[in-house]
Amino acid sequence: MSHQILNMTDIVKCYYLGGEEQKVLDDVCFSVNSGEFVSILGPSGSGKTTLMNIIGCLDVPTSGSYILSGNTVEDQDEGELARIRNREIGFVFQQFQLLPRLNALQNVELPLIYSGVGERERKKRAAEMLNKVGLSDKFYNKPNQLSGGQQQRVAIARAMVTQPTILLADEPTGALDQTTGKQIMTLFRELNAEGRTIIMITHDPEIAKNATRVVQILDGRLSEGGV
Amino acid sequence: MFRESVRISWSNIINNKMRSFLTILGIVIGVGSIIALITIVQGATDQVTSQVASFGADKITVSTFGTPLKRGLLDRDIKKLTQIENVAGVSPTISKKDSVVFAKRVRENVSIQGKNEVYFDKTRDLMENGRPLNILDIESKNKVCLIGANVSNDLFWGINPIGRELRIGGIKYKIVGTLKESFGFTISSNNDAVIIPYTTAMSFLGTRYISSVEIFMADSKQSETITTSIKSVLNEAFNYKDDSFTIFNMQDILTTILSMTAMLSLMLGGIASISLVVGGIGIMNMMLVSVTERTSEIGLRKALGAEPRRIQQQFLIEAVVLSVFGGAMGLFLGVTLAFAVCNLIGVNFSLAISTVLLALGFSAAIGIIFGFAPARKASRLNPIDALRSV
């Protein structure tokens, strides 16, 4: 019943630094089925952030093909990429990336503004999502009135509120202490158990183990298999 | 979506109150001075225009110097002038300074003016008491007169002058009316005048010639053709001699005044709009700073699905909100200033709706023009770089 929602074939990403070509991703082939919880494990400089950017449609590959939920990503313009991101991807960042002037509810509402959801519906869905991540009493708190773990929960609620195809997390526990990190991982596993597809990028093998499948990236090359 | 952008813009402005205020100060001053200048100049123009119009905008005044043989116009020339198309009436003036006597009282150096009934028909607010001259007075050369306020006050203090007899050059004239006192600066003050029928003046004042004529137009739009016709009549009357007459057209004066004040407003407005441009640059500067400051916010919004178009729209709206807000403040400032100045110099204050729209439209345009580059910059930010710049 699970089907392929993401398929990358021969993805190459090059950067030009000082006239020299640097291959950050080298013929990466990668696919994810719906309902999977995949960790992409790699040390810094391995190309995992570049891979995440490409998965998240923030960047396009130099060559290769990338199909996300039937969308051919590599030949879309910026506007179309933005719409795909809005629809298909829920981002969770290491530094939470909440807007400091907005309260929790408004932060969660943000992606819905860009998908054109009306104000009342936005509030309702954002509130539901905050309840789900266990912040029902923090709707009107600004990010600086929340702990790191709570901020990351708000960020997860924001990522989930559009019901995206993939929850894409970049070092989601990187800025948190161990206990809080574990709580966040528990939340991820719960979300996955509900059928949410999650791709998590991390350098920490212990964190990566939370996933149902771990792939390793080293020097721009991807290999299946655990630690 | 639009409302969302306006709300975001507003909260950004509120969050940077001091900076926003300093930024829009240029717009406030620019719009304020434009509004004030336009309103004050407009008020002054209206004042001058209505004053000039009160002298008679539908009136052409001819003064004659004549020739050695013919020192002024004669009755037959007046008839010809009357026959010109679109001329509603012709009022000749024969004038002479003389002393007037009532009982034992003498007033010297009074302006004795021979006029006709047309003058009384066409001039507003002339009569105080009694009756004006009529056609019978003219045709029968009646020895009747109307007296100005100063003459009346001087010679007839406490006495009703109507029905009394006034002596001019030894001849008795019956006073049939008094003229209203005119205040302030007007060319055609009759305060010191005594008006008699011009036909009577021709016979008894010792001047056979009419020195000036007022020609009233039925249609002041035709003033040019009428003036041409008048010229040809006068040229004929004075045998085509140069410099034998001058034609003074209120309409022309009015047109000149209007074009002068229009030029003046344009010039002053031009100077004031320099500060609008400076204000616009201020807005551009603040928007550029704002884009840089909010790079990571822009990146996040883009990652969450904001299209470049949306980002551009948001920053553009922010610039416009900023400048229109400045425009509104400038409008308030300008109107207050104009009101104060108009009261101070005694000019009617009236605010044209077009001025208000101009101010707001202009400031919105400034916002769009100077907000465009920063908004475009924001929309082109690469979300990856933008997110990284935390």
Image (cartoon, rainbow, N blue to C red):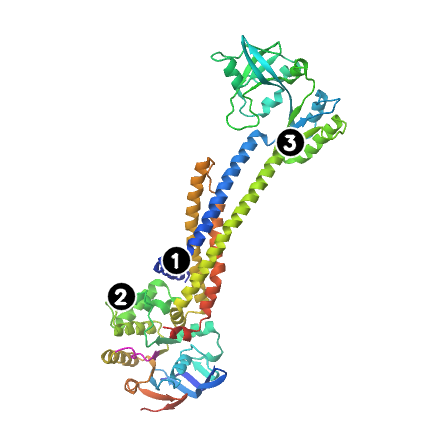
x then y, percent, for residue A88? 39, 76
The kind of residue tagged 1 is Ser
Measured Cα–Cα span from mark 2 to mark 1? 26 Å
Q: Which residues are magenta?
A: A168-176
Q: Nearer the viewer, residue B299 or B254?
A: B254
Q: Residue drawn 44% across and 62% down?
A: B285
Is A3 within the magenta?
Answer: no
Residue that carries the numbered disc 2 in the rendered image = A141
Q: Quadrant of the C terminus of chain B?
A: bottom left
Residue A127 visible (yes or no): no
Tell me where residue B10 sits by quadrant: bottom left
Q: Nearer the viewer, residue A140 or B259?
A: B259
Residue B184 vs residue B222: left or right? left
Is A171 within the magenta?
Answer: yes
x then y, percent, for residue B116? 63, 20
- Above or below: residue A177 compared with residue B55: below
x then y, percent, for residue B364? 47, 55
Q: Are marks 2 and 3 on the same chain?
A: no
The kind of residue tagged 3 is Phe
Tell me where residue B63 sits by quadrant: top right
- Above or below: residue B43 compared with residue B173: below
Residue at mark 3: chain? B
Q: Quadrant of the N terminus of chain B?
A: bottom left
Residue at mark 1: chain? B
- Above or below: residue B298 compared with residue A1: above
Residue that carries the numbered disc 3 in the rendered image = B248
Secondary structure under the numbered disc 2 in the rendered image: loop
x then y, percent, for residue A29? 42, 88
Residue that carries the numbered disc 1 in the rendered image = B20
Q: In the rendered picture of this protein, how many numbered marks are placed on residues?
A: 3
